[in-house]
Image (cartoon, helix red, strand yellow):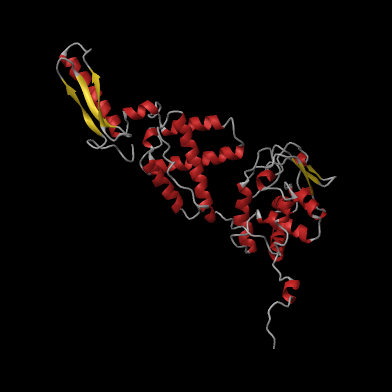
Amino acid sequence: MCLIQSLAYIDYTPPKLTRGKVWYVSYKVRNPLTKKFKRFRIKVNHFGSASERISAARNVMANLEHRLSLGWSPFTEQSAPKAYMRISDAMESFMKVKRKELEANSLRSYSSFIKIFSDWLERSGIGKDAPAISIDASIAVKFMSEVEGRPDVSPRTFNNYQRFFFLIFDWMRVRGYVSENPFSGIQRKPKRLLLKIRRMMTDKELESVFSFLKKANPEYCAAALLCYCCFIRPKEIVLLRCGDVDLANKLVHVKAEISKNHRDSFRTIPDEAIPFFERLNLVNKESFLFGDHKENDFHPGKIQMCSRKLAKYWSEKVRPACDLPQEVQFYSLKDTGITNMLSCGVPINEVQRQADHTSVAVTAIYVGKTCPKANKLLQDVDLIPIRD
């Protein structure tokens, strides 16, 4: 049922039968633009006898009363011809289109948002079988308020929810499921709240992490080294196949179709990291380097692993074992690796190539990101005119 039903004498007047030369059922509905009531009539003259007309009129009035109570409006029907299709069917139609357009990770994300919303509709008493038109601005506000109140939802995650539901309901609006986008009034969190909490790792933290992984999970350690030494992003790591790793030449091929920048690149594997990749079974070149197995298994496999599994293992296993704070994340390995490589004296243009940065200026951002030190020249300058 609809969470907020239209009220008689506020949004509409109940239908009634008028008998005379012309028999008709009439009702009034408030025009959402002018805020004034407009009367509508449905003739029942074409039924022969009076009893047939009365029976037909009763059926018409009962149907109208039910639809009006759910929020239906003849004004809405003109702009949203599919308004009374189930919201679950509308969302499934959206996903049917997107399955032809999107990559697997995006589809998983979209499916997750839809499941969360469907479950919420059920818990709220609205139901996923409610008509699409019943999802109005008040429901959107209530849903997003509950999302915002969850302890695991950051401002960035809140904005991801807002973007998705604005997207799907705008798709519905264009295709006639709803007359207006109920999420258009939901404001995103400001940029000042979206600053990344991620920080680089200290030498002690790095030593702790790799010492732990070497014993606890060498295969996951290989994934961590791809991020730390080869600067490969988590979403690219899970798309790598065994054939992309060339141990003879100590290279990893990040193909354009899986790269964030849509460019081919080759990343050098440092000698110290080679033993961790030799442990992996790279015989089947088409297998994913890290397959989708049981929870903590990171061996190659035929099914692609979700990138969130890398972050989950880091959060649930690595962080507690190494006593890492929340701001030290899996992706901190990449930031730390770039900075440490520059600190080791590797030319900045070579680091740029390894990181697949668009320019040296991007790589230069990482220069000096280690523990800050006072500038000796500035320390010694004789600037203040005070004498003993």
Is any part of residue 102 visible from this angle? yes
Left or right of 124? Residue 14 is: left
Residue 253 horizontal/vertical position (percent):
77, 42
Quarter of the rendering containing residue 24: top left
Where is 310 relative to 208, above or below? above
Image quadrant occupied by the C terminus: bottom right
**Residue under the point 40% across and 31% down:** 86
Q: Position of residue 264 (x, y in %)?
A: 75, 40
Q: Position of residue 74 (x, y in %)?
A: 32, 27
Residue under the image location 73 percent in, 36 percent down: 286
Residue 114 in view, yes or no: no
Residue 173 is left or right of residue 300, and the answer is left
* Left or right of 84, for residue 292: right
**Which image quadrant: the N terminus?**
top left
Nearer the observer, 243 or 26: 26
| Residue 217 locus on image (x, y percent) | 69, 54
Front-most of 279 and 270?
Answer: 270
Residue at 76% across, 72% down: 377
Q: Nearer the viewer, residue 277 or 349?
A: 349
Where on the picture, by quarter, is residue 258?
top right
Judged from this view, the residue extending furthest toward the top is 48
Work out whether 344 lies above or below 277: below
